[in-house]
Image: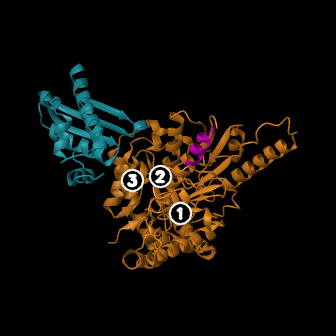
């Protein structure tokens, strides 16, 4: 199992890592017992993602996935952010080992949950 | 800077003395040991020398050592070989006792026999220290128990298992059953009682512990060369004279028909030499050195990393292991971060690294699954230095701190 340089780069220096105080919405997926937990914070302005931050408990791939995904989602319209797929994330990371693909799905799920939580407000 | 290797339970470098002994057996001495000519005889002599070196170390007869490709094959041969031999002779529903902390090379053959409807099995749970009780094993023995398989040292946390006590109990039960049978009148007694056989996977123990098969009351013992500074791809199974094993691998009738396949001569030569290097004096010296490094490291981590839990119980584990849990951070992310700094460790066992499940060994020890994913195994070797330990003690705490910051607050682990 080998990670691409992009995965390692995101793991070493994750983008948009942290917490948004007074976030407009939060999404959380996974659980500690399974070894992965991702939390997405959104600040939304004019139906666009004005700011996005993440916190991740998980393997290097899980951290890289959330980092790369926040890059893809930032400044996007909510509907465009909703349309981000796991393949988009995997592509932006170069590739992911097959056993780690589920991490990318988890990241997408957390983002979508945050957006849905915002819409429910 | 030179990378630091702290994964000696996964594999070890080949000792230079071992390598030197192996080199002639590639291009200079290359005969097939099964060949009758002088080339073959020269190889047989080399193989037999190694067989003697290993037999001497285990305190058994030369003819009781069977070469294999490593401990995985040795365990497979011991389990399938014994059970299939008895099943083929009409023994109905043999019972196997093993533990929840065995290597998959023991658990999976047993599970296949269960799935095939050939055996029933009892799994013994370890205590919190990762040690099974000899008493629990004794209690699990039934009339139809054919095989008890207990590893000598657990590969993940390094816990030493009471194999001598287990072996002694089994021997007593075998003797008592035989005596009772002999004391029963011939007209009233049934068939001669079936002996219970005791197998141990000593892969992780050979380096550090007394592996005398007589002293340990063992009937079969698996060992591997690459864990003891020998080459990869070679191992052996000790089988006490008289124990019937049905071969798993068929072909050219090598190894007294128990294991067909041309012998890995150079590997076997290296394996023999690696075992020969495990003299009492060398083992004592290495154990002292390795445990000093391990203790320096473990104490340093406990002091500098808040919340770190040492799973390895020192004094009841081999000196090489320092297995830690860093609650709140996933183990693999620590492994990758350390690797990027030139430090090689593992999250449990190299074999488990393709799996995403929490370690079954840790769960069996009663460790909650919420923190079982947060484990890292550091295993020290005879070539590590104090300077390396000091460097890792500098590298590790900031990594843990950084990954803690990335992770959300986790009430589950508190």
Label ID, residue B320 = 1
Tell me the subunit letter for badge 3.
Answer: B
Which residues make up the magenta segment? B81-90
Q: Position of residue B293 (x, y in %)?
A: 52, 68
Say which colour chain A has: cyan
Residue positioned 31% across, 48% down in the render: A60
CA gap between label 3 and label 1 equals 22 Å
Q: Is residue A24 left or right of residue B414?
A: left
Q: Position of residue A54 (x, y in %)?
A: 27, 40
Q: Position of residue B273 (x, y in %)?
A: 52, 74
Label ID, residue B249 = 2
Would you say residue B88 sits in the magenta stretch?
A: yes
Residue nearest the viewer, comparing B383 with B271: B271
**Residue tagged 3:** B400
How would you rate the neighbour count of disc 1 (Cα within 10 Å): few for under 14, some for 14-19, many for 20 or more? many
Q: Is residue B64 left or right of residue A100?
A: right
Query: Which chain's colour is orange?
Result: B
Label ID, residue A90 = none
């Amino acid at each position: 199992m080998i990670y691409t340089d992009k995965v390692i780069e995101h793991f070493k220096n994750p983008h948009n890592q942290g917490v948004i105080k007074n976030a407009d919405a939060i999404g959380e997926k996974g659980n500690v017992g399974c070894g992965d937990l991702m939390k997405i914070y959104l600040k939304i302005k004019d139906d666009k993602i004005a700011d996005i931050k993440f916190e991740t408990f998980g393997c290097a791939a899980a951290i890289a996935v959330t980092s790369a995904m926040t890059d893809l989602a930032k400044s996007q319209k909510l509907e465009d952010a909703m349309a981000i797929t796991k393949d988009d994330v995997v592509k932006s990371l170069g590739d992911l080992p097959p056993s780690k693909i589920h991490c990318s799905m988890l990241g997408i799920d957390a983002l979508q949950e945050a957006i849905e939580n915002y819409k429910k407000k | 800077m030179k990378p630091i290797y702290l994964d000696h339970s996964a594999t070890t470098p080949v000792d230079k003395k071992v390598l030197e002994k192996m080199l002639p057996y590639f291009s200079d001495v290359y005969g097939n040991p099964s060949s009758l000519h002088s080339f073959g005889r020269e190889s047989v002599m080399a193989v037999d020398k190694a067989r003697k070196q290993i037999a001497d170390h285990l305190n058994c007869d030369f003819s009781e050592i069977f070469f294999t490709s490593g401990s995985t094959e040795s365990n497979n041969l011991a389990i399938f070989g014994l059970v299939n031999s008895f099943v083929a002779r009409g023994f109905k529903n043999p019972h196997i006792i093993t533990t929840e902390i065995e290597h998959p090379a023991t658990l999976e053959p047993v599970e296949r026999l269960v799935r095939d409807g050939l055996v029933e099995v009892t799994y013994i749970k370890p205590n919190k220290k990762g040690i099974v009780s000899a008493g629990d094993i004794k209690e699990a023995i039934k009339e139809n128990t054919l095989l008890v398989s207990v590893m000598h040292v657990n590969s993940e946390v390094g816990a030493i298992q009471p194999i001598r006590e287990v072996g002694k109990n089994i021997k007593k039960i075998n003797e008592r059953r035989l005596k009772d049978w002999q004391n029963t009148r011939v007209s009233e007694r049934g068939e001669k009682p079936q002996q219970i056989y005791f197998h141990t996977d000593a892969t992780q123990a050979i380096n550090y512990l007394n592996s005398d098969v007589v002293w340990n009351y063992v009937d079969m013992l698996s060992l591997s060369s690459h864990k003891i500074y020998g080459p990869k791809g070679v191992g052996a199974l000790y089988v006490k004279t008289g124990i019937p094993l049905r071969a798993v691998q068929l072909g050219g009738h090598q190894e007294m028909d128990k294991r067909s396949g041309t012998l890995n001569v150079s590997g076997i030569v290296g394996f023999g030499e690696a075992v020969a290097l495990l003299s009492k004096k060398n083992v004592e010296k290495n154990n002292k050195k390795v445990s000093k490094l391990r203790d320096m490291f473990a104490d340093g981590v406990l002091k500098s990393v808040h919340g770190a839990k040492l799973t390895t119980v020192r004094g009841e584990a081999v000196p090489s292991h320092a297995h830690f849990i860093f609650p709140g951070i996933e183990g693999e992310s620590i492994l990758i971060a350390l690797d990027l700094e030139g430090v090689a460790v593992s999250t449990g066992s190299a074999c488990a690294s393709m799996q995403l499940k929490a370690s079954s060994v840790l769960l069996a020890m009663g460790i909650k699954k919420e923190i079982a994913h947060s484990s890292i195994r550091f295993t020290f070797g005879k070539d590590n230095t104090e300077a390396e330990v000091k460097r890792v003690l500098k590298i590790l705490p900031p990594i843990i701190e950084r990954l803690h910051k990335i992770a959300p607050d986790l009430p589950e682990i508190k």
